[in-house]
Image (cartoon, grey):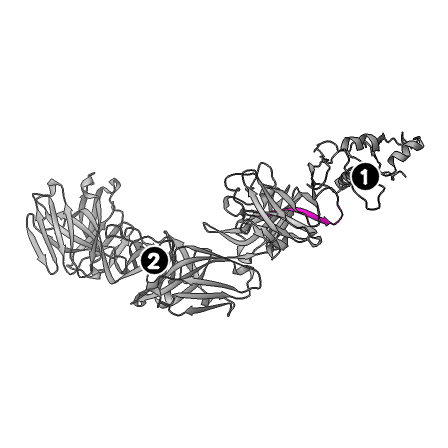
C-alpha cells in the first residue's frame, strides 16, 4: 500500500509539501527533493506517472560527513570559491553542484571523479587526493546569491539518488559607495544612508568584524525611531533612506545598506574615525528661570567651521530632533558668529518642558550619505527660587514635570551625590526615614518631604526622571539652612568688635575650604545681592575684615570704628554643596555702654534675653561702684581700690518672696557722712525654680581695655534647667 506524500503534479509545475518537493526539471526529468532527512524517512517510495511507477528503497545513514553548512560571501563582479570535502567512500562518484530555487533544485555543474569541467562562469575540479572538489564562480552577479548543495552520485541517474554532503549559503554584496566620517570623543553621530531605488526593501546597519557583517540590525518599523541591536534606526520609506543614530561612537567600519533579495545586498561602507578636540566632547550645563530667554554658545572644531550648524533636543530613546521640527514655531533661533566657528542658540520664553538634553553639532554631506556630528552636550535645567529651611524643621520640595514624563520613574538627587538619589521605592536615608517622596500623576508633580533638617541638608538638589538608561535632571532646587542658634552682639560706638562664627557642619578635608562670608540684611537673600560685607575671596573691605581658622571651624569677622548705622541684622554664611548655611547675628551699637567695648552672647531662645539683660545691669552697676566723686565741682575721678569699694560701699542681701530690709538701714549719721560722695550699690540675687526644656550656650562679655573692671559673666549650658540671675539696682544713698 502506498501513502501519497505529495499529490500528483502537473508537468512543469512544482508541488511543495513541507520537506518534500515534486517537480519536473528543465531536462524533463521528474525530481523529488527531500530536505532535513531523519531516520524516520527511511523506507520504500514509489515514483511514477499515472499507473506507471518505480519503487525506491531509501536508507538513512548516520554520518557527520554530510550535514555541514557554510556561509560564503562574494562581492559583485568579483570571484568566489566553494569548497566541498567528502568521505573516502564517495571518491569514485561524480561530483555535482545544485542550486535551490523556489523549493526545487537545479543542477549547476558537475564533473567525473578526478576530473574538471567549465561551464560559462562556473568551473569545477575534483581532487581525490585531498578528498575535496572545488567550484569557482567568476564575475559574480546578484542572481548568483542563494543556497547551493554539494552532492555526489552515479555517473548516470536515469533512476537514482544524489546525496548532498554540504549546504552552502552564498551571499552577494555590492558596495555602492565608501565614505569616511569623523566624530568626536564623547559625542554622537547621526547618519542618513539613501537607497532611493530600493525604498521598500529591508534596510540594515552593521559593524564589520574581519571584513564580514555577521549581525545586522534591521529597521522593523517605518517612520518611527526604534532602538534595536545596539543601534537606534529610523526607516524613512518615502525617501528610501535609513537614519542611524550612533550613541556610543567607536572607531570601525560600518555597513549601511538594503537587502535587494534574501542573498543580495547593497551597502555604503562607512568608516568612522574618532578624534579629540579641546573645544568639544564635554557637557555644558545651562540653568534658566521660567519665562526667561536662555542663550547657549556652541563651539565646533575648526575643521567644521564652514559646515552647516545643527542643534537638536534629545528624546526618550536618545533620538535628537532638529529644533526646526520642534513646536511651537519661533521657540528657537540660531545665529552664526562669522569666522569663529561659534554659533548661538536662543531659547525664548522658557517653560518646564524646555528642560532636557540638547546637542550642538554640524552637518556634512558626501554623495548619497549625509551625517551629523554631535559635538557638545547641553543640559538645560529650570531653576526655582532658593528655598529656606530652618534647623530641626520640616520642608516640602515640589517637583512639577511635563506630561510626557508621567510614566517615567521619578528621582530626587543631591548635587555631586548622584549615588544617593532616591525614588518612591528607595529612600535616600532609609535608616532615619527623614526623606520621603509622593507622586501625584494627575497634577503632574511629585513632592519630596525632608524632616528634621540639619546643616548637612543644605545644598543643590535635582528633580529628575529616568529616560531609558539615562537620568535626566530637569529642575534645580537650592536649599539654604538657617540655624536655630543666633548671635547677639552689643558694641560701643567708635570702638571695635570681633564676631566669631562657628561652622555648622562637620569639619573634614572637603569642607575646610568652604567659602565663608558675612553680609547684612533682614533676609539671607541679601547675601545674593550687594550686601556682602566681607568674604573668603575678599577678606578685607573698608572697616570689615574676615579671618578663617579652618582647623578649628571658626571664622572671625572684625568691625572697626563702630557706628550707630552698623546696627542691624547680619548673617554668618558658609557655602555648602552649591548652597549656604546661615547663622543670624543681631548687632546693636550704642553710645553709652561704660566698661566694655562689646558684649557678645549666643541664644537659642527669646527667653534667654531676660538673663542677659540682668547680666548687663550687673556689669553696669559694678563699673559704677568703682567710681568716686570728690567735693570739687570739676567731678575729678579718684582711683579706688576694688576690694575697699566692695567692703565699704556694697551690701548684699538675699531676697525672699516677702519684703526684706537692708542690714544697713539702721546706719548712724556718722556712717552716712562717710559715704555721701561715693556711689553705693546694693546687689540682690534670686534663685528661680528650674524650668525644663531651656538650654543656652555660653555667653561671654568682652572687656573694654579702658575699663578698670575685671568683671565677666558666664552662663553655662545645662540640658535640664536654667538658672536666672535677677539684679536690682537700689537708689544712691544721700
In percent of width and height, residue 636 lies at 79, 43
How far apart marks 1 and 2 lie (CA) works out to 91 Å
In percent of width and height, residue 655 lies at 86, 31
The circle drawn on residue 628 is 1
Q: Secondary structure at mark 1?
A: loop
- Image quarter of residue 24: bottom left
Kindly report which numbered mark, 1 or 2, lies closer to the viewer in this rendering. 1
Residue bounds of the magenta highlight: 580-593
Visible residue check, residue 89: yes
Instruction: Compare residues 83 and 96 and report the one nearer the observer.
Output: 83
**Residue that numbered label 2 is attached to:** 183
Q: Is residue 588 magenta?
A: yes
Apparent side of residue 541 relative to residue 50 in the rendered image (left or right): right
In the picture, the quarter occupied by the N terminus is: top left
Instruction: Compare residues 367 and 223 and report the one nearer the observer.
Output: 367
Apparent side of residue 193 relative to residue 377 in the rendered image (left or right): left
Amino acid at each position: 500500500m502506498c501513502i501519497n506524500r505529495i499529490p500528483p503534479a502537473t508537468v512543469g509545475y512544482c508541488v511543495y509539501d513541507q520537506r518534500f518537493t515534486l517537480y519536473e526539471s528543465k531536462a524533463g526529468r521528474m525530481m523529488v527533493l527531500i530536505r532535513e532527512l531523519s531516520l524516520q524517512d527511511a523506507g520504500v517510495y514509489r515514483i511514477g506517472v499515472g499507473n506507471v511507477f518505480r519503487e525506491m528503497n531509501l536508507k538513512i545513514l548516520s554520518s557527520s560527513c554530510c550535514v555541514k553548512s557554510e556561509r560564503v560571501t562574494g562581492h559583485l563582479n568579483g570571484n568566489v570559491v566553494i569548497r566541498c570535502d567528502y568521505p573516502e567512500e564517495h571518491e569514485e562518484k561524480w561530483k555535482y553542484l545544485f542550486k535551490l530555487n523556489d523549493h526545487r533544485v537545479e543542477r549547476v555543474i558537475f564533473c567525473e571523479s578526478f576530473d574538471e569541467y567549465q561551464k560559462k562562469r562556473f568551473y569545477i575540479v575534483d581532487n581525490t587526493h585531498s578528498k575535496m572538489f572545488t567550484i569557482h564562480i567568476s564575475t559574480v552577479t546578484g542572481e548568483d546569491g542563494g543556497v547551493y548543495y554539494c552532492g555526489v552520485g552515479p555517473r548516470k541517474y536515469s533512476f537514482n539518488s544524489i546525496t548532498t554532503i554540504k549546504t552552502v549559503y552564498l551571499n552577494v554584496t555590492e558596495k555602492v559607495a565608501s565614505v569616511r566620517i569623523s566624530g568626536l570623543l564623547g559625542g554622537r553621530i547621526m547618519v542618513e544612508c539613501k537607497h532611493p531605488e530600493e525604498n521598500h526593501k529591508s534596510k540594515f546597519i552593521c559593524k564589520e568584524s574581519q571584513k564580514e557583517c555577521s549581525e545586522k540590525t534591521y529597521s522593523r518599523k517605518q517612520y518611527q525611531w526604534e532602538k534595536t541591536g545596539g543601534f537606534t534606526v529610523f526607516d524613512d520609506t518615502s525617501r528610501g533612506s535609513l537614519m542611524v543614530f550612533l550613541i556610543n561612537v567607536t572607531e570601525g567600519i560600518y555597513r549601511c545598506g538594503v537587502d535587494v533579495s534574501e542573498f543580495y545586498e547593497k551597502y555604503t561602507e562607512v568608516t568612522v574615525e574618532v578624534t579629540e578636540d579641546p573645544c568639544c566632547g564635554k557637557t555644558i550645563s545651562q540653568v534658566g528661570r521660567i519665562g526667561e530667554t536662555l542663550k547657549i554658545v556652541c563651539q565646533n572644531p575648526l575643521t567644521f567651521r564652514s559646515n552647516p550648524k545643527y542643534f537638536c533636543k534629545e528624546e526618550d530613546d536618545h533620538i535628537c530632533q532638529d529644533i526646526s521640527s520642534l513646536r511651537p514655531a519661533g521657540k528657537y533661533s540660531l545665529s552664526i558668529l562669522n569666522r569663529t566657528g561659534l554659533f548661538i542658540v536662543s531659547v525664548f520664553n522658557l517653560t518646564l518642558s524646555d528642560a532636557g538634553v540638547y546637542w550642538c553639532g554640524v552637518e556634512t554631506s558626501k554623495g548619497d550619505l549625509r551625517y551629523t556630528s554631535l559635538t557638545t552636550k547641553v543640559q538645560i535645567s529650570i531653576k526655582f527660587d532658593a528655598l529656606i529651611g530652618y534647623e530641626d524643621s520640616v520642608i516640602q520640595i515640589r517637583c512639577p514635570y511635563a506630561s510626557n514624563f508621567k510614566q517615567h520613574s521619578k528621582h530626587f538627587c543631591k548635587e555631586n551625590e548622584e549615588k544617593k538619589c532616591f525614588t518612591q521605592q528607595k529612600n535616600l536615608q532609609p535608616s532615619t526615614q527623614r526623606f520621603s517622596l509622593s507622586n501625584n500623576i494627575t497634577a503632574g508633580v511629585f513632592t519630596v518631604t525632608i524632616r528634621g533638617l540639619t546643616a548637612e541638608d543644605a545644598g543643590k538638589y535635582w528633580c529628575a526622571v529616568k529616560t531609558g538608561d539615562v537620568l535626566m535632571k530637569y529642575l534645580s532646587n537650592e536649599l539654604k539652612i538657617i540655624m536655630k542658634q543666633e548671635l547677639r552682639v552689643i558694641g560701643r560706638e567708635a570702638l571695635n568688635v570681633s564676631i566669631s562664627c562657628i561652622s555648622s557642619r562637620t569639619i573634614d578635608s572637603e569642607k575646610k575650604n568652604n567659602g565663608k562670608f558675612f553680609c547684612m540684611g533682614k533676609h539671607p537673600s541679601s547675601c545674593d545681592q550687594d550686601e556682602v560685607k566681607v568674604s573668603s575671596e575678599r577678606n578685607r573691605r573698608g572697616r570689615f575684615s574676615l579671618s578663617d581658622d579652618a582647623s578649628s571651624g571658626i571664622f572671625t569677622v572684625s568691625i572697626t570704628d563702630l557706628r550707630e548705622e552698623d546696627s542691624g541684622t547680619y548673617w554668618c554664611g558658609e557655602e555648602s554643596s552649591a548652597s549656604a548655611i546661615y547663622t543670624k547675628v543681631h548687632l546693636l551699637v550704642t553710645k553709652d555702654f561704660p566698661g566694655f567695648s562689646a558684649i557678645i552672647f549666643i541664644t537659642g531662645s527669646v527667653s534667654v534675653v531676660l538673663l542677659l539683660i540682668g547680666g548687663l545691669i550687673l556689669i553696669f552697676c559694678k563699673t559704677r561702684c568703682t567710681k568716686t566723686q570728690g567735693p570739687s565741682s570739676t567731678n575729678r575721678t579718684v582711683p579706688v581700690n576694688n576690694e575697699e569699694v566692695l567692703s565699704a560701699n556694697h551690701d548684699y542681701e538675699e531676697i525672699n518672696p516677702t519684703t526684706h530690709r537692708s542690714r544697713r538701714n539702721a546706719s548712724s549719721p556718722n556712717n552716712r557722712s562717710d559715704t555721701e560722695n561715693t556711689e553705693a550699690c546694693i546687689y540682690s540675687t534670686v534663685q528661680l525654680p528650674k524650668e525644663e526644656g531651656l538650654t543656652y550656650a555660653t555667653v561671654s562679655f568682652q572687656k573694654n581695655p579702658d575699663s578698670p573692671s575685671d568683671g565677666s559673666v558666664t552662663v553655662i549650658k545645662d540640658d535640664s534647667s536654667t538658672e536666672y540671675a535677677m539684679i536690682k539696682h537700689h537708689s544712691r544713698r544721700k
